[in-house]
Amino acid sequence: LETVSVSIVPVSGWSLASNVAPGTILELAGPGVHVPAVLEGLRGRDDAPIVVRRASGAPTAPFVVGGETGLLLRDCEHVVVEEIAFIGATRCAIRIENCRSIAVRNVLVARLGPDADADGLEIVDSTGVDLQTIRFDGWQDAGLELRGAREVRGGDLQFTPLVRHRNRTAIRVGAGCRDVHFSEFTTRAIPTAVEIGTAPGTRDTPETSGPADSPEDGATAPSAGVVDRPVDSTSRGIVFERARLDRPDVAFRLLDAVGVDLRRLTIVDPKVVFEIDAEVLEAARFADNLVVWNPGAMSAFAKVVRGDEGLELGGNLWWSAELPAARPLLGDLPGRAATPQRFSPDPQVAPRGHP
């Protein structure tokens, strides 16, 4: 298959539809600023993906600046986006909607807003998304938002707050997500580092046409006479491992979810490790993790509204110089301990988080 390269010059429109051949490389030339784009109906192949990237030999990454959404991928297959910076979108830097087999790697998303719901990267009703080496600098609601996303993998992700941005949540795995696995990522001083699950009372939604578990923006209401059938949109099969969560207000917010595995994490100076409000939290496990904090940094092990009986604690090390005197002030550990928890020795965490 012959590779075809198409050069996209700064400030030119580059929204494209389905007439792009598999194996095509769309190169954003620079230096200069590129306008936002919509890529719809692109069909690459497993052996010949359509690639969107900076021009070969360019000294710096191209910038896609402004717009409501910096890059919208809709109904695409086998597309790779790499080596691009997305700056200053008002609502979302990258939105992946109703897509299959998408890769995003070596990109920057930054300075999202001022929309209060502005996210860095959204994956909606899509399957087979791979995220690698992405830096999130300053957003409003979620750095990374997943809804109806399946078979998602992510690694080497960095979430860093900026002033004058709300930076509410680093990663949110929401309704209808299945088989999601993130590793080797870092969050720094984000109010809620990770949120998993669906808010109680919102899991069952009317079924509409198409594969989505819940209606999204632009979905049409069922025709008159159609009987709605409830769809369970509980998140299932969620794994977070080998990551560092640094100074979160809440490290993990757990809602309705089944099959959550939190392992080999380093959590430093959290105010609260868990916030749990779930009607259905099943097969959730927190094991082989390290939680360390400076005296006075942590206010409670957990804030539990309901549902923590579905959380199992494996072997974890909780350490602070204020222990054991501060144990009564921190409340109870959530869930049930399948393995005795350890509160010593000092793991002597290095600056990069390694014990």
Image: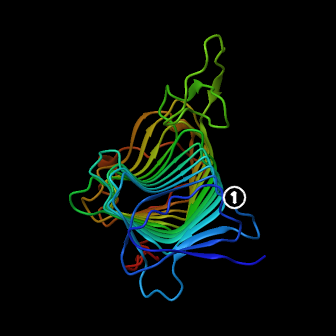
**Can residue 263 be seen by looking at this rendering?**
no
Residue 59: quadrant of the picture? bottom left
Rendering coords of residue 288 (x, y %): 56, 62
**Can residue 212 be seen by looking at this rendering?**
yes
Residue drawn at x 41%, y 83% as measured from the top left: 60
Rendering coords of residue 46 (x, y %): 75, 65
Rendering coords of residue 173 (x, y %): 52, 47
Rendered position, 108 above or below 118: below
Rendered position, 14 above or below 211: below
Count neighbours of disc 1 (C-alpha within 10 A) and say few if under 14, some if 14 to 19, many if 20 or more: many
Give the residue number, with chain letter if any, for mark 1: 43
Left or right of residue 259, residue 111 in this image: left
Who is closer to the viewer here, 355 or 136?
A: 136
Left or right of residue 97, residue 168 in this image: left
Residue 62: quadrant of the picture? bottom left
User: From the image, which quarter does the N terminus lie in?
Assistant: bottom right
Task: Name the outermost residue toward the top.
Answer: 225
Rendered position, 253 above or below 47: above
Residue drawn at x 31%, y 67% as measured from the top left: 321
Task: Name the outermost residue toward the left.
Answer: 164
Left or right of residue 104, residue 18 in this image: right
Residue drawn at x 30%, y 53% as measured from the top left: 113
Left or right of residue 295, residue 209 in this image: right
Please state which amino acid type lies under the numbered disc 1: Arg
Q: Secondary structure at mark 1?
A: loop
Residue 253: quadrant of the picture? top left
**Which colour scheme appears in the figure?**
rainbow
